[in-house]
Amino acid sequence: MSRLISKMSRRAIVQALIALPALSLFRNPPAPANPDEIDRDEIVEINGWILRRSDLA
């Protein structure tokens, strides 16, 4: 592992670290079959805050 990192440039490592948060944009959570059946204890992220859905109402 250290051999791989030593061959990578610092620039490539920094670019990879910057790109990591962008990967969450490609995740597509499945939509609920019925909007009335929303799980109240589901954990959601809103503006960087991790909350339970029941805390929002």
Image: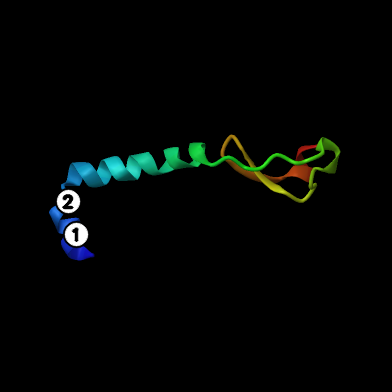
Residue flagged by tag 1: what amino acid is it? Leu
The circle on residue 8 is 2
Q: Nearer the viewer, residue 14 or 7?
A: 7
Q: Which residue is rendered at x = 22% and y = 43% of the image? A: 12
Secondary structure at badge 2 equals loop
Badge 1 local density, few (<14 within 10 Å), some, or many (20+)?
few
Q: Nearer the viewer, residue 51 or 2?
A: 2
Quadrant in which residue 6 is drawn: bottom left
Above-or-below relation of 17 to 4: above
Badge 2 local density, few (<14 within 10 Å), some, or many (20+)?
few
The circle on residue 4 is 1
Above-or-below relation of 19 to 2: above
Residue 43 image offset from top left, x and y in percent: 68, 48
Residue 3 image offset from top left, x and y in percent: 16, 63
Residue 24 image offset from top left, x and y in percent: 49, 41
Residue placed furthest toward the front: 33
The circle on residue 42 is none
Q: Which residue is rendered at x = 58% and y = 40% of the image? A: 28
Relative placement, left or right, of 31 versus 34 is: left
Q: Are circles 1 and 2 on residues that touch, CB within 8 Å?
A: yes
Residue placed furthest toward the right: 36
